[in-house]
Amino acid sequence: MNVDLTDLLESKSGGKGGKKINPGNHVLKINSVTTKEDEKYPEKKYIYLNVETEPIEDFEGFYIDNDQSKGRHAGKIGKINVNPFGYKDGTMPSGEPVSQQRSMFMFIINLCKTLGITDWAKEQNKKHETAESLINAFNANQPFKDIYLEYCVGGQEWVNSEGYTNYNLQLPKASNGKYALAGVNENKCLKFDTAIHIYVPKSKTVEVKKFGDDDDDDFNIPKSSSAFSLD
């Protein structure tokens, strides 16, 4: 039987998959930040950046919030796990305690530094009991609106039931003075490398729905205020 390609020929994005970000180097803006508990280990939490590319000419993106009345995204979108190992309370090999909440606070504050919105971050001092509360304010106030950064986006590969390859997006570790997030044109962002930044599970036929039940909390970070830092 001959294949009907009408849907692909009429689509301005080459089909549904063309509307999503894949691993690689991108210039992106943040639309929102979300958190989620690990389904298997509820003491562990993840932070996700919901991001979008710069507007693409003659492109028809997904509906915003799946709501036709809000119009469509002007660029491709994606959901990036900022730390695939997750955030949890624990103890370093040195014996130093690790606080889940402080680590999550640290991520958002240093994201603000990278975005150049430290004044907003300072205004939040002593206003929040939890990192989730700070993230709620971040989303409500949207100080990040339309600020673009350079990203190196990695991913964990999985294959869906129809045999198509997909990726759970994640931020890779810093290396040699290059970082997953950096200001545009600062030359501080990692160059994407498939061999390094794509994780392929031993069994690719099993759908992977989430990251990290790994207990390794080592997540390298940059050391400048303009590139992404957790210091």
Image: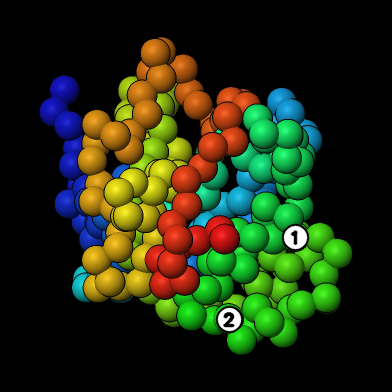
Q: Is residue 12 visible?
A: yes
Image quadrant where residue 186 sits: bottom left
The residue indicated by pointer 1 is: 131
Residue 134 occupies quadrant? bottom right
Q: Which residue type carries mark 2?
A: Thr
Answer above or below: position of 59 versus 97. Answer: below
Front residue (pair 54, 118) = 118
Q: Quadrant of the N terminus?
A: top left
Residue found at the very far left of the displayed protein: 2
**What type is the residue that disc 1 sits on?**
Ala
Structural distance between the alpha carbons of marks 1 and 2: 16 Å
Image location of residue 187, percent across then percent down: 24, 66
Which quarter of the rendering shows the C terminus?
bottom right
Callout 2 crowding tier (Cα within 10 Å): few <14, some 14–19, many ≥20: some
List x then y, in percent, for residue 93: 65, 30
For the residue labelled by badge 1, is the local secondary structure a helix, a strand or a loop? helix
* Residue at the image position 47 percent from the left and 45 percent from the top: 220
| Foreground label between 1 and 2 | 2
Q: Residue at x 66, y 72 (%)?
A: 138
Determine whether the residue tagged by mark 2 lies in a helix, strand or loop: helix
Number of callouts: 2
Residue 118's disc number:
2
Choose the circle earlier in sequence order: 1 or 2. Answer: 2
Q: Nearer the viewer, residue 225 or 83?
A: 225
The picture places residue 215, in percent across and down from the top left corner, at 62, 27
**Residue 41, which numbered label?**
none
